[in-house]
Amino acid sequence: MPTIDEIATFAKKKGFVFPSAEIYGGMAGFYDYGPLGSEMVMKIKNLWWKSIVHDRENVVGINGSIIGSEAVWNASGHVANFIDVVAFCKKCKLKIKVDKHEIGKAKCDCGALYENLGEFNPMFSTEVGVIKSEAVKAYLRPETAQTIFINFKNVLDTSRVKLPFGIAQIGKAFRNEISPRNFLFRMREFEQMELEFFTHPDKKNDCPIFEEVEKVKVNVLTAKEQAGTGKMESMTMGDLLKKKIIKTKWHAYWIGYRYNWYLDLGVNPEKLRLREHVPEELSHYSAATWDIDYEYPIGWKELEGNADRTDYDLQQHTKSSKVDLSYYDEDTKERVIPHVVSEPSAGVDRVFLTLLMDAYHEEEVKGETRIVLKLHPDVAPFKVAILPLVKKDGLSEKGKEVFNNLKQKFNSFYDESGSIGRRYRRMDEIGTPFCITVDHESLEQDDCTLRERDSMRQIRIKIKDLSDIIKKLSEGEKLETFGKFIN
Ligand code: GAP
């Protein structure tokens, strides 16, 4: 696996990600997505949205504003409790953030004990209003979740949702991180994909769809093991629930569902694990939190979190706004404040980084190093590239005809210049799963070759069958189902 710095260099070179304002020297913690990166980001968000909102009848989406009044962030507890501690290594002159419970224990890589430089709140503040005396303080949201809670009543009043139900959102969040480092891993401006899933307080176990995830195999590091030997165990989600390691069925469902999402996208199962938060590290709103971690070159780190936020946020906003945020349960004929039994919360950028790192491979092919991004076809920037063997003899026209047809269905790329070998390599490097070549035979037979990125094998197929075959290959069917290998 490449180091994080190597992947950052690669991402820039290929047009995935650029340091923001680079021509002015850049700004730590800010990045811009280039042509390939923005395609991939859009696909990640669309896949998440489809699986969380569109594929379900009890989840709706919102898109809230980024700047929120001071009242919101006072009520949510972020002004008082969203606190990092700045630790400083005198020897390396390095500043990092540590959790409050690590004070006095955290050590720098060089072995020296960190010095505590004090606490700070990573929220970006601003003022709304141009006339100083009338301006009011506001914050850029450090999590998207709060715009869901403050719209809870609006959603209840306007949608036909009934408990249990969820409200989802994808949007930007901002944290003035002390040491934004490791490329996209810790940024100051990033994007979150969050779902707040609400249940009746007494029905956190009434999950009729747990079966979907019961057999999902996960690597688990419990809070108990972190205090003990630190051993990771392999279990099913069913076991985790049965043994009451995860306390409620809905929480277990969403943790398992999200873990499986990464497995479905082809992420190396050995590099994924679930880690339970130890009591001292729980956020101020959480009764239980589980992270899905990935093993990066910098160690096991959080890829996404999932907290049981209880009724904390709705209670806080009810108290502060004096607006009743309770829910009338028609079955029990009572008003209740619902619980957020589960909050799957993933950073778009962190998912992007993980998929890129996990997909990056260097292989020896005929004495040369081939860089190949083994990205799942659903997240690769381009699904298919159309590469006429040569420009002349009408192959260019034939290639464009194929391109114009395929681009209606898939994000397609057309390239007619340079040697075919080099064009294949270029597509491997940016993760394009399928390459189509039209040659002189194509003009007579109306067929083409289809090359698969990972195996580099090719078959010959009719042009009219292309889109159907590409769709099936993307869904996991084998190349040999559609023709004999010709290489
Ligand atoms: N609403 C819950 C919440 O915000 P979090 O664990 O602080 O929880 C959730 O953040 C996810 O957001 C993380 O798992 C990570 O993927 C992403 N994230 C958080 N801070 C980030 C940062 N500085 N840069 C990039 N992604 C970040």
Image: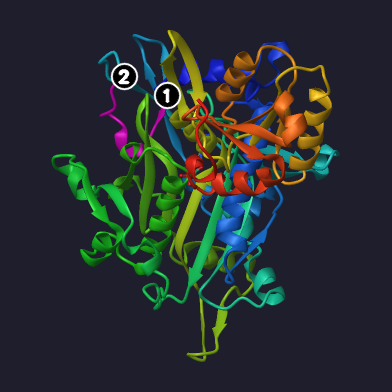
Q: Nearer the viewer, residue 429 or 134?
A: 429
Report which quarter residue 26 is drawn in.
top right
Q: Is residue 243 visible?
A: yes
Task: Please name the residue shown 27% across and 29% down the image.
Answer: 104
Q: Secondary structure at mark 2?
A: loop
In this figure, which colouring scheme has been used for the structure? rainbow
Residue stretch in magenta: 97-107
Q: Find the distance from the CA under tag 1 to the CA under tag 2.
A: 9 Å
Task: Please name the residue shown 62% across and 19% down the image.
Answer: 14
Count the marks: how many?
Answer: 2
Q: Position of residue 113 (x, y in %)?
A: 27, 20
Report which quarter residue 18 is drawn in.
top right
Q: Is residue 474 found left or right of 280 in the rendered image?
A: right
Q: Position of residue 278 (x, y in %)?
A: 28, 47
User: Decide: marks 1, 2 in contact (CB < 8 A)?
Assistant: yes
Task: Please name the residue shown 47% across and 25% down the image.
Answer: 360
Q: Is residue 152 above or below residue 14?
A: below
Q: Is residue 324 above or below residue 409?
A: below
Q: Nearer the viewer, residue 176 or 198?
A: 198
Q: Nearer the viewer, residue 270 or 382?
A: 382
Q: Position of residue 135 (x, y in %)?
A: 79, 43
Q: Is residue 197 found left or right of 238 in the rendered image?
A: right
Quadrant containing the N terminus in the rendered view: top left
Type of the residue with mark 1:
Ile
**Seen from this angle, which residue lies furthest left?**
229
The residue beneath circle 2 is 108
Q: In the drawing, what numbered circle is on residue 96?
A: 1
Task: Please name the residue shown 74% across and 17% down the image.
Answer: 390
